[in-house]
Image (cartoon, grey):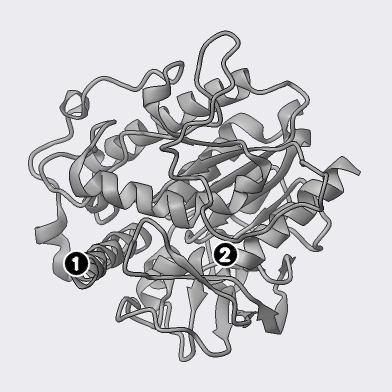
Amino acid sequence: MCARRFLGFVFVLTLLVVAGAFAIYQWGGNVLLKSATPQGHFEAAAAGSGPDYTKLESWLCHPTVFGPGKEVRDVDDPCRREWTGPNPEPGLKPQVATFYVHPTTYLERDQWNAPVQPGGQTEFRTRLFATTQASIFEFGEEVWAPRYRQAAYGSFLLDSEDAKKALNLAYSDVAAAFDEFVRQIPQSEPIILAGHSQGALHVMRLLKDKIAGRPIARRLIAAYIVGWPISTKADLPALGLPSCHSRQETNCILSWMSFREPANPSLILQSWEKTKGLNGARRRQDDLLCVNPITGTQDGADLRGIGGIVVPSADPNTPTMNFNSLGAHCDRGLLIIDGELPPLGPYVLPGNNYHVYDYALFYGAIGQDALGRVMAWHR
């Protein structure tokens, strides 16, 4: 039974590689274009009506059950951490609410956007990502992760009206969820934003549309925009926050894309450099943002590293932790992995791109980074 479950997990990871590749290769992957493009034209109704974020069913993860006087933890919450992770000092419970947006998990071609309640393997993959990513921030016991009509992975391959509409629909759900999140939490409570791949793209838009230049920006401890390229000159100024330059800094942005030497990001960046950023300037690799999650600093390097890597196990619902130290350094905007990796399987993308593992490889480091910033904000 364990062997069969593990093989199932391997199959799921293989699909995740495909999803991750398409999500980050927004401007590439022409060989698989035909087999990846959703059928027909965009139809908002195909994904069903939009989620109602006043209802618990519209949330993948939520800290409480809605209703007057109810304070009951959702026992089926995939963002809960079931293994050792970063924890505050004894007797301290840092107040922080985390808003997490999961990456692309809808691999179908039948429509441009997934339904709110996708079921099947899409649901399984979505929960798997929440377990290995969002649970990092569970030390605050308040992780919010919306279900949303995510754009199908094929949407990232085309510069078409259908693709743009699919991404805009997905973002409209995330934006509505964020509005409800802000309404539900105390007005003085600090927040963390986190996303990966498609989720990181939506978090970028949230920063630009709903946080930059507004009072809520003072409550933002940090934004983890992971697995999506950000230009320090063409994108960062429009996001209203600087990149992080120290471990104790708050109100800042962390972003990285994980590679191993010899790294070749050309499949991602050749076309990315031809696009304009959020402020209209041209994007260039020389301006690519890399904040090392181990050091918590822009262009940082720590070859010794921090332990805490999520690795596959026979049961995909309960990943195991490997506490061997893993180092990393930033080089020309890429986060280059240093040190010996545990067996992860053949799931590395072309160019030695570890996109699928952007969070998993640095699980312990990200947790320590986030916890340190939360404690600094409260001091």
Instruction: Name the residue type under label 2.
Output: Tyr
The quarter of the picture where residue 306 lies is: bottom right
Q: Earlier in the sequence, mark 2 or mark 1?
A: 1
Residue 124, above or below 174: below
Residue 227 at x, y percent in the picture: 48, 61
Give the label on residue 210, or none: none
Quarter of the figure with the C terminus: top right
| SS for dot 1 | loop
In the image, taking residue 139 as reference, residue 33 lies left or right, namely left
Extreme-right residue of the structure: 379
Instruction: Name the residue type under label 1.
Output: Met
Extreme-front residue of the structure: 1
Q: Which residue is mark 2?
A: 363
Residue positioned 32% across, 40% down in the render: 150
Residue 377 at x, y percent in the picture: 84, 44
Give the label on residue 1, or none: 1
